[in-house]
Amino acid sequence: MSAPTSASSARNLFIESKARLSDRIQVNVNSTGSLAKQIVKSSKSNETLMHTARNFALQEYAVENSETNLKKMQLLTNNLNMQLDNIQKSALVIKDVKEQLHQILS
């Protein structure tokens, strides 16, 4: 009778050990999942990524705006240079007119 009892006892011990091992594996898997979740949460990688993307978009807008402003400044510079040329030509004409008036009045 001791043989059947020993086999039954061994089988029960095996089943019990298997159940405990399964429980421990489940606990370890849950702990690993919790750890991974905590790492992602504490790293705030999503927030950092969104912040970086937003800043990049703002920088892109700033670059485009700067390019537009530079083009406007170039147009204004060209316009001011043309006005300066016209003023210089007018100044030469004024000198000529002044000399002519001086000759007429003398």
Image (cartoon, grey):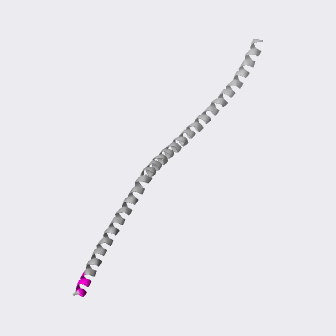
The image quadrant of residue 104 is top right
The one of 13 and 99 positioned closer to us in this rendering = 13
- Quadrant into which the C terminus falls: top right
Q: Residue at x 24, y 86 (%)?
A: 2
Looking at the rendering, the stretch of residues picked out in magenta corresponds to 2-8
Instruction: Answer left or right for 49 relative to 7.
Output: right
Q: Residue at x 34, y 68 (%)?
A: 24
Above or below residue 22? Residue 85 is above
The one of 42 and 54 positioned closer to us in this rendering = 42
Q: Count the labels in the image.
A: 0
| Image location of residue 36, percent across then percent down | 40, 60
Above or below residue 93? Residue 10 is below
Magenta segment's dominant SS is helix
Instruction: Answer left or right for 79 relative to 6.
Output: right
The image quadrant of residue 69 is top right
| Image location of residue 90, percent across then percent down | 67, 25
- Quadrant into which the N terminus falls: bottom left
Is residue 4 within the magenta segment? yes
